[in-house]
Image (tube, rainbow, N blue to C red):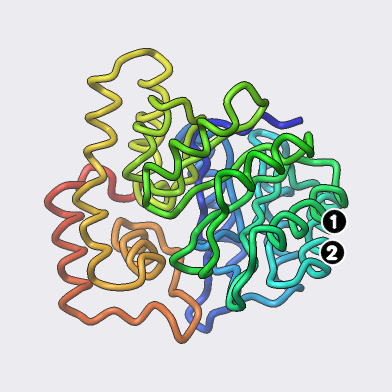
Amino acid sequence: MTEIKGIIAAMQTAMHEDGSINEAEQRRQINRQIAAGVDAVFCLGTNGEFYIMSMEEKIRVMEIFVDEVKGRVPVYAGTGCIGTEETVALSRKAREIGVDVLSVITPYFAAISQEELYQHYAQVASSVDIPVVMYNIPARTGASLAPATVKRLAGEFANIAGVKDSSGNFNNILQYIQETEGMDFSVLSGNDALILWTLLAGGKGGITAIANILPTVMVDIYQNYLKGDMEKAREAQNAISRIRECFKYGNPNSVVKCATNLIGQPVGPCRKPFGILPQDAVEAIRETIDNYYGEYKNK
């Protein structure tokens, strides 16, 4: 199975001004990420706006990614839906298209127990023969995968291959690592600020939104870590702090997409109603890019 590791670019879905998918730009962005040296590309995550796409659009995005990548790096795809049946159907379709790894977010909106989470992931894992990475983002879903549940699933299903934690709680990442010690299992940071620290604690990498803006910087974190050059790894990790400070101006998805456009990569707008930032926020993001990341424009 595909090894779950490294810098995995949580790619935005490129869109035209009317909100339709911009296939040509999506393909260009895929190649930009691969040229920067990412270990994998990931479509239909939170930054890919999966939550506002139809099933047909999700399928088309996966087809674009698999076709454009052509096996150069693994393709991850978000196939998690609120219902188990729909998640299984989309996961099977992803497998049929040629996706290498599934990312499955916890069901959201309605309250859910740990046993219900276990049953959900167990059924998804039993329905496909490719790796499944569980996605924990409680601030967005209202559900949190307990470390004990992660251990149970990782121990019972060979293709439950990892977990992405976007809780922002480093202690949660540590508990995932401790509970799965000795297993063939990868813990990934979904928080860009914690990637190096996750690696140092025994995790395997990160799924990163900031790669849309600064792919070479994110790659430098991991590559310098592999080389044992902790000074350069920390330098790269610290370099993203200024752009992350801009998340205070709005929805992080909207801020990242705004910044990606401002740095010279025309990925277009977020799909409505999201993506509307006040002009002073846009100018603050522009100033941050000009002051700290000017060298990365158009890269």
Of residues 164 and 24, which is closer to you in this image?
164
Of residues 117 and 224, which is closer to you in this image?
117
Which residue is drawn at the image coordinates 52% and 75% (left, top)?
16
Which residue is drawn at the image coordinates 72% and 48% (left, top)?
66
Q: Secondary structure at mark 2?
A: helix
* Mark pair 1, 2: CA separation: 5 Å
The picture places residue 89, in percent across and down from the top left corner, at 84, 64
Q: Which quadrant does the C terminus fall into?
A: top left
Q: Badge 1, how many Cα within 10 Å: few under 14, some, many 20+? A: some
Q: Badge 2, how many Cα within 10 Å: few under 14, some, many 20+? A: some
Q: Secondary structure at mark 1?
A: helix
Q: Residues at badges 1 and 2 in contact (C-beta under 8 Å)?
A: yes
Q: Which residue is mark 2?
A: 89
- Residue 218 is labelled as none
Q: Toward which corner of the image does residue 108 lie, by quadrant?
A: bottom right
Which residue is drawn at the image coordinates 78% and 66% (left, top)?
84
Residue 34 lies left or right of residue 98; in this view the side is left
Task: Name the amino acid, label 2.
Answer: Ala
